[in-house]
Image: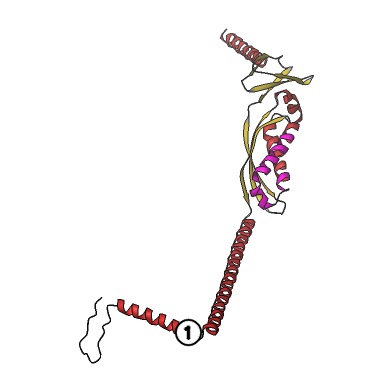
Amino acid sequence: MAAKMFEFIGKFGLALAVAGGVVNSAYCRVDAGHRAVVFERFHGVRDIVVGKGTHFLIPWLQKSMIFDCRSQPRNVPVITGSKDLQNVNITLRIIFRPVASQLPHIFTSIGEDHDERVPPSMTNKILKSVVARFEAGDLITQREQISRQVSDDLTERADTFGLILDDVSLTYLTLGKEFIEAVEAKQIAQQEAERARFVVEKAEQQKKAAIISAEGDSKVAELITNSLATAGDALIELGKLEAVEDITYQLLRSRNITYLRAGQSMPLQLPR
């Protein structure tokens, strides 16, 4: 009796487990921000997309695949070459989500792991294509234009895979060590050239100043010669008198000079 009882309980438990599995497979629960695609064994993937809620499925005949339709961020690092064959290390950040109405096509052509396969592949290809159009120096000075070009090309490419790009931005961009050293050497050469040009311009200005000074001295000598020819020795005598007057004035103002009369041995203090 006990053996039959345990056998009955075992069969009942097995039947209950099978029934539970069948009932569980008959329902599909779709959470918020997700969508489901239904696969039928004899028909394939249906063209309808199941939204949020709990939905009934025919056991064994139908199966559901859940897709996350919320925006997902991804950083894609790429090492590529510029137009002038310089190495460029660039990282692009994209935020993407699938188009809900195209989920059956995405599942059929790509698979459930489309979010792991498509974004890195297309981003890598677009980045290499855009960067190859610019020289290394332009990648820094025209970064905004390059980011816009990448965004436009990537949005167009993503549309063919049934994806929507909510945001595209360049987060990291560096050039090769050789290019950076070449830029630094070029800047040093330009600074040296500017310094040499300044020295040359300074020498030219000094030369012009010397010429102007010589021309001025020549003009003064010419005026003096003309004045002597016109006034004779009177101009020289006038100059001597002016010099004597100036010397006398300076001596009178000096405190360290005393005056003695002829034959006088004691200093004579003159009134100030």
Residue at the outermost top position = 1
Q: Quadrant of residue 150?
A: top right
Q: Which residue is mark 1?
A: 234
Q: Is residue 194 left or right of residue 260?
A: right
User: Height in image: 179 above or below 64?
Assistant: below
> Is residue 113 in view from this perspective?
no
Residue at image location 60% in from the left, 64% down from the top: 194
Percent of width and height locating residue 58? 72, 14
Colour setting: secondary structure
User: Height in image: 250 above or below 7?
Assistant: below
Percent of width and height locating residue 270? 24, 80
Q: Magenta stretch containing residue 148, yes or no?
A: yes
Q: Quadrant of residue 34?
A: top right
Residue at the outermost left position = 266
Depth check: 48 or 227 in front?
A: 227
Quadrant location, the N terminus? top right
- Tell me the element at label 1: helix
> Which span is picked out in magenta?
129-156
Q: How many marks?
A: 1
What type is the residue that disc 1 sits on? Ala
Q: Quadrant of residue 152?
A: top right
- The rendered magenta stretch, by its main secondary structure, is classed as helix
